[in-house]
Amino acid sequence: MGIVALAALPAIAYGQGLTLGNMAAALKTPLLVPIRPFDERAMAPGTPVFGVAAEQFHGIDILRVGEFKTCSVDNPHQWFRGKAVVVTFSSQGGAELEDLRGFLGAPAGSMNGVDNVDVKLDASSLHTPYPHAQHNFTKALSGANCAARDERAKVAMIVRPVIADISLTFTGRGLTRRQAAAFISKADPAPDVATDGTSFKVVLLHRLVALRLAESP
């Protein structure tokens, strides 16, 4: 049983909250800022998670983490994938685009020259009966590696992770391939960049975008 660590959050700018609000309303689950590649075995229902703090962001529930760590579950009770949800919206205006940048985890300056981003999330979530999640949680937390953690650290239980493939079309002026590459990982398809610099499209695959947590059972 190992501990999986995710890096600390970058700072995010506070806009009017419409960009994240659209997603939070559709997914009905607190958003994780920024999104992360999803590891099903390390973030399944019942997984213990440390270092997570709920926060209100323009009235929206989000999860802010200084350092996000989980303890994996050996031979967990099985989970199932829920019905897919498709979310589409557009984000524009400096503050809203900065909120989107923070959610995506892109570096500062990545929205330079961008006027609008059309966003599409193809999302689904993992579920298991709550007693099964509790069993997974207790089993993982009692493992030698997990039990050796700082006992002062607050622990929560992952109840429902939400995973999505995200398609984004950016339009603006002077947009570059290097700029587009700032939004993707090596596991994602190469960006599609217009030769006149007016647009580019990226697809982010299998990202953890939101989490429903419960306090330590």
Image: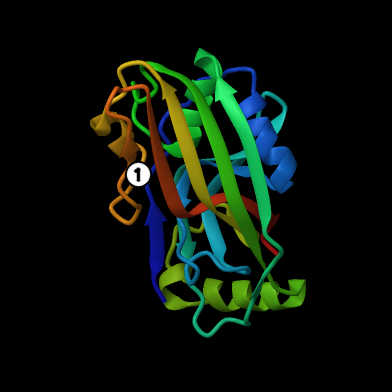
Question: Looking at numbered disc 1 in the image, what kind of residue is underneath it?
Answer: Ile
The N terminus, quarter of image:
bottom left
Side (left or right) of 8 relative to 215: left
Side (left or right) of 115 relative to 175: right
Q: Nearer the viewer, residue 174 or 194?
A: 194
| Furthest residue in direction left, as rendered | 178
At horizontal 58% and vertical 46% (from top left) the residue drawn is 121
Provide residue 215's location: percent of width, then percent of height: 69, 56
At horizontal 63% and vertical 39% (from top left) the residue drawn is 88
Q: Is residue 140 above or below residue 51?
A: below
Local crowd at mark 1 within 10 Å, few (<14), some, or many (≥20)? some
At horizontal 61% and vertical 54% (from top left) the residue drawn is 123
Residue position for label 1: 184
User: Helix, strand or loop at disc 1?
Assistant: loop
At horizontal 57% and vertical 52% (from top left) the residue drawn is 154
Q: Nearer the viewer, residue 207 or 202?
A: 202
Decide if residue 148 is in sight here: yes
Side (left or right) of 82 relative to 108: right
Q: Nearer the viewer, residue 30 or 136?
A: 30
Provide residue 50's location: percent of width, then percent of height: 52, 54
Provide residue 57's location: percent of width, then percent of height: 64, 28
